[in-house]
Image (cartoon, rainbow, N blue to C red):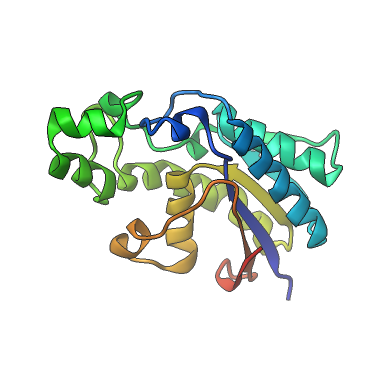
Amino acid sequence: MMTGTLILVRHGQSEWNLKNLFTGWRNPNLTDQGIEEARATGKALKTAGIVPDLYYTSALRRAQHTLDLMLEEMGILNVTITRNIALNERDYGDLSGLNKDDARAKWGEEQVLIWRRSFDVPPPGGESLKDTAARTLPYYDAEIVPLLQAGKTVLVAAHGNSLRAMVMAIEGLTPDEILKREIGTGQPTVYRIGPDGKLVERVEL
């Protein structure tokens, strides 16, 4: 009975995380702290003796850079990296680029909280977490789960909400439960997945 290993990592702190801006599909770089977070994650995976077979990331620079830095620290070169828009962060639509305090001043604190913390209410022109899951999970199910079922080790560097969608499915969480789950920048979570595609063990490094 082969058990696959899935490592989920949110990108390191970005310039817009630092400035408290809604980022979504915009493309800021990592901060110096974000670079250090990515390197520390790579070192932690190397220390744990985890060597991935396959690598996935989004179409956004901050996640790609995080993965590159992790691989550098792990001493892994010349590998194929699969980048796909399905792993992108939730699109914040009209909120993208706005300071969160400015958004509250414009739409009201209660409305902004609904957009940020409800499962199925999208901001104007953007996606809800439900919408994000609707594009992320089919990709995860089709591309990644079969690899895990075959006993492979897969590393995914992505974003808070695309990772939330996967965590929700893997751990069987409700919409309320996943909305309360904080996924820190640069923090890896390791899942052992059985041949039936179900969770066997969750480990925080």
Task: Residue 11: give x, y in percent of width and height.
Answer: 57, 40
Q: Is residue 3 visible?
A: yes
Relative to 81, residue 48 above or below: below
Relative to 147, residue 10 above or below: above
Which residue shows up at 54% across the image and 46% down it? 185
Image quarter where the C terminus lies is: bottom right
Name the image quarter holding residue 13. Answer: top right
Name the image quarter holding residue 51. Answer: bottom right
Which residue shows up at 27% across the image and 51% down it? 119
Task: Residue 8: give x, y in percent of width and height.
Answer: 59, 53
Horizontally, residue 83 falls left or right of residue 179, namely right
Relative to 203, residue 102 above or below: above
Horizontally, residue 196 falls left or right of residue 124, namely right
Which residue shows up at 58% across the image and 30% down it? 30
- Residue in the foreground of this view, choosing between 52 and 15: 15
Task: Residue 197: give x, y in percent of width and height.
Answer: 57, 66
Which residue shows up at 73% across the image and 57% down it? 153
Q: Is residue 83 visible?
A: no
Task: Residue 48: give x, y in percent of width and height.
Answer: 78, 62
Image quarter where the N terminus lies is: bottom right
